[in-house]
């Protein structure tokens, strides 16, 4: 296969991960904060600096005001609109969002409101798709709303487990919207996912654990959830990005 046959997106949890993704050959990054919550909107400063340092890799930004479910209040939708406007002003290439209804359907009104603010930026519907009750109907609705792609694991914990639905959705899409296979995609399974689904866009994090710089940290105090090792952090590895891409070339 040729390199141009594929698009590789790295889920980046900061500017350092964005740079590693770019050096490893990623086509774009999805910049997120709050990774333990499944990804939330990054700060103004994070977006601005990422935009400055990414000169070969496209920058997409998740628009998600909080963790939890994907049913948003009018005030939350308003904040998301403002965040999309900020992303546009900062020169972001694309935004990633998704709103659902109480009964697990696509929130047509909420998503339409946000789409009005994209101003020509690429729009990805994120893994809220994997929580909806009727993926086939949802796909048709997202095409009608004008989304460019859907990030999905095939409604399973990982994309590898979701291969049957990913395959069916890719056939149903018939080139009208792009399927972006993500969650648990790595060096060991990306080729088999491609060969069985014929999906050509992949989303992965390629992270490694890196020790913190502090030589002393009070063991009796924690900043977040108890039991989490806060002296370690995860960042994207340039080598892992490159090696994952290489499995399809």
Image (tube, rainbow, N blue to C red):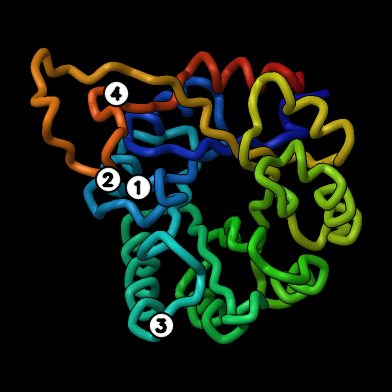
Q: Is residue 47 above or below residue 17?
A: below
Q: From the viewer's perspective, is 176 left or right of 86?
A: right
Q: Residues within 10 Å of mark 4 (few under 14, many from 20)?
A: few
Tag 2 near tag 4, CB within 8 Å? no
Image coords of residue 151 (percent x, y): 64, 52
Along the polypeptide, which appears first: circle 2 or circle 4? 2
Asked where in the image residue 213 lies, by quadrant, the reply is: top left
Q: Nearer the viewer, mark 1 or mark 2?
A: 1
Cα distance in 3D space between marks 1 and 2: 9 Å
| Residue under numbered circle 1 | 33
Compare marks 2 and 3 and give the one earlier in the sequence. 2
Give SS at disc 1: loop
Please name whichever residue, 40 or 20, is drawn nearer the observer in this view of the structure.
40
Q: CA distance from mark 3 to mark 1?
A: 21 Å
Q: Is residue 168 above or below residue 28?
A: below
Marks 3 and 1 close (CB-CB < 8 Å): no
In whole angstroms, how far apart are the C-alphas of marks 4 and 3? Answer: 35 Å
Q: CA distance from mark 2 to mark 3?
A: 26 Å
Looking at the image, residue 103 sits to the left or right of residue 28; the answer is right
> In this figure, which residue is indicated by the disc labeled 2?
46
Q: Give the residue at x 81% y 49%.
A: 166
**Quarter containing the N terminus:** top right
Are circles 1 and 2 on residues that touch, CB within 8 Å? Answer: yes
Instruction: For mark 2, give the secondary structure.
Output: helix
Q: Nearer the viewer, mark 2 or mark 4?
A: 4
Say which label, 3 or 1, has the lower sequence index.
1
* Numbered label attached to residue 73: 3
Mark 4 or mark 1, which is nearer to you?
A: 4
Compared with residue 154, is residue 119 higher up or lower down, i.e. above or below? below
Point 8% across, 26% down: residue: 218
- C-alpha span from label 4 to label 1: 16 Å
């Amino acid at each position: 296969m040729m390199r141009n046959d594929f698009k590789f997106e790295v889920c980046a949890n900061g500017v350092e991960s964005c740079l590693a993704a770019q050096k490893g050959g990623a086509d774009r990054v999805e910049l997120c904060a709050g990774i333990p919550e499944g990804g939330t909107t990054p700060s103004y400063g994070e977006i601005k600096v990422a935009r400055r340092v990414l000169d070969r890799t496209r920058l997409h930004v998740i628009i998600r005001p909080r963790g939890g479910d994907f049913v948003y209040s009018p005030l939350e939708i308003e904040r998301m609109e403002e965040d999309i406007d900020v992303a546009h002003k900062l020169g972001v290439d694309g935004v990633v969002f998704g709103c659902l209804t109480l009964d697990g359907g696509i929130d047509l009104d909420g998503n339409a409101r946000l789409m009005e603010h994209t101003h020509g930026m690429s729009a990805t519907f994120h893994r809220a798709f994997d929580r909806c009750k009727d993926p086939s109907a949802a796909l048709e609705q997202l095409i009608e709303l004008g989304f460019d792609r859907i990030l999905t694991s095939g409604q399973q914990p990982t994309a590898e487990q979701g291969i049957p639905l990913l395959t069916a959705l890719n056939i149903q899409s018939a080139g009208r919207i792009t399927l972006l296979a993500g969650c648990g995609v790595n060096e060991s399974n990306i080729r088999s996912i491609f060969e069985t689904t014929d999906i050509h866009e992949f989303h992965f994090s390629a992270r490694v654990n890196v020790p913190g710089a502090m030589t002393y940290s009070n063991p009796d105090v924690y900043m977040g959830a108890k039991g989490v090792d806060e002296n370690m952090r995860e960042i994207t590895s340039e080598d892992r990005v490159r090696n994952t891409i290489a499995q399809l070339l």
